[in-house]
Amino acid sequence: MQDHFTGQLTRIQGRSLPGDQDRRDLQHDHERRLAALHRLGAAAAECGVRADSDRDLILVAEDEVSLLEGAGGSWATFGAAIRELRALLPLRPLEDFGFPAAPLAVGGSGDLAEIEATNPLEESNARLRRIGGGVEAWAFAAEADNSVYKFYLPREEGRIGSEFVFRPGDETTLRAEAGLGSYRGLLEKLLLVHALGGMATEVIAVTPEGILVAKQALGEPLAQGDDVSRVLPVGLIEIPSRFLRANRDHPRLFFLEASEGGVPRAFLVADMHARNFVRCVDGGLRVIDLVAAPWPAAITAREPLIADWLGRVGSDPDATALPGASDDEL
Ligand SMILES: Nc1ncnc2c1ncn2[C@@H]1O[C@H](COP(=O)(O)OP(=O)(O)O)[C@@H](O)[C@H]1O
Ligand SMILES: [Mg+2]
């Protein structure tokens, strides 16, 4: 299938849910994109190019270092890494998605009020009708086929999306607080939505202003406040509240397995409230959005009780905070 806006190959169209092989391919694409961003960061550092935020890496042009590449060595590696990322995350102007070519005030120092005052995403256009959002993403459905396009708006200082940071808690060991995130964090969140059996999600482009564009199948929203605690994705592990509390709903531990195997990576995922679920054509409820962060392993390794629990939940998701005791008794 071809995407209506980009002409690129797409595995998502309208309300239909991609089959198993397409889902695996989508997950693999997410992983390759994250790996390419990681390699690009390493290659840039090797050349002494410092990126204050990963926004600079995400937006680097294909021919940015072409003059230096002839020198070979780390510059040639840098050039190759740029092209590798660009192939997995093309740069496309917002006009390709039917929006006016109005300048969007997003610079290194662009503050939130300024960005929002000039935000062209507030209005539907002839090809995309607004269906929601306005926190991290502005969500639209395509008039042509109802596929959902989400535009993640960059924020001040090269930040985008939401991610957890961890602080010592008062009554608990750790407190997770959602704040502005990075591009890596956003790409990881979209992978997590997909990997934990949520709505099929594809990353399709980034605009020169740094707006990240993702695509999803269309579902029916749930009413705000619906209780979704019983329909959370399988594979999520409840975290004893004496270890961690978060300022978002339903914080859970999730072990992300890579397509190519290896040791699963632990994440904190949360914010799975009713508005972050939709009902799909097959009647199933799927997550469309969440807030996450890599599990703070360096901190929890110093906390013997948490480290012990982590070691046990990997193989037994129902393991309690203390071996042999129910969490209700503690
Ligand atoms: N795939 C989808 N199908 C139907 N509605 C959607 C879909 N994705 C987003 N929406 C609507 O847009 C809203 C915002 O999208 P979301 O991804 O949750 O972004 P945000 O980070 O801004 O909360 C959702 O709460 C929902 O109402
Ligand atoms: Mg949301």
Image (cartoon, rainbow, N blue to C red):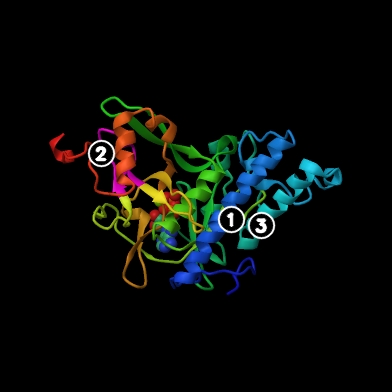
Which quarter of the frame holds ligand 1? bottom left
- Secondary structure of residue under mark 2: loop
Looking at the rendering, the stretch of residues picked out in magenta corresponds to 237-253
Instruction: Give the residue number, with chain letter if any, for mark 3.
Output: 90
Q: Assign the N terminus to one quadrant of the image.
A: bottom right
Q: What numbered label is drawn on residue 32?
A: 1
* Vertical relation: 187 (above or below) 165: below
Q: Quadrant of residue 158?
A: top right
- 2 lies left or right of 294: right
Q: Assign the C terminus to one quadrant of the image.
A: top left
Q: Quadrant of residue 320?
A: top left
Residue 146 can be seen, yes or no: no
Query: What residue type is disc 3 on?
Result: Pro
Spot occupied by residue 171 in the image (x, y as percentages of width and height):
25, 26
Give the mark, 3 or 2, whose residue is nearer the N terminus: 3
- 174 lies left or right of 99: left
Spot occupied by residue 78 in the image (x, y as percentages of width and height):
74, 45
- Secondary structure of residue under mark 3: loop
Residue in the foreground of this view, choosing between 15 and 173: 173
- Disc nearest the viewer among 1 and 3: 1
Q: What numbered label is drawn on residue 240?
A: 2
Q: CA distance from mark 1 to mark 3?
A: 14 Å
Residue in the foreground of this view, choosing between 257 and 190: 257
- Secondary structure of residue under mark 1: helix
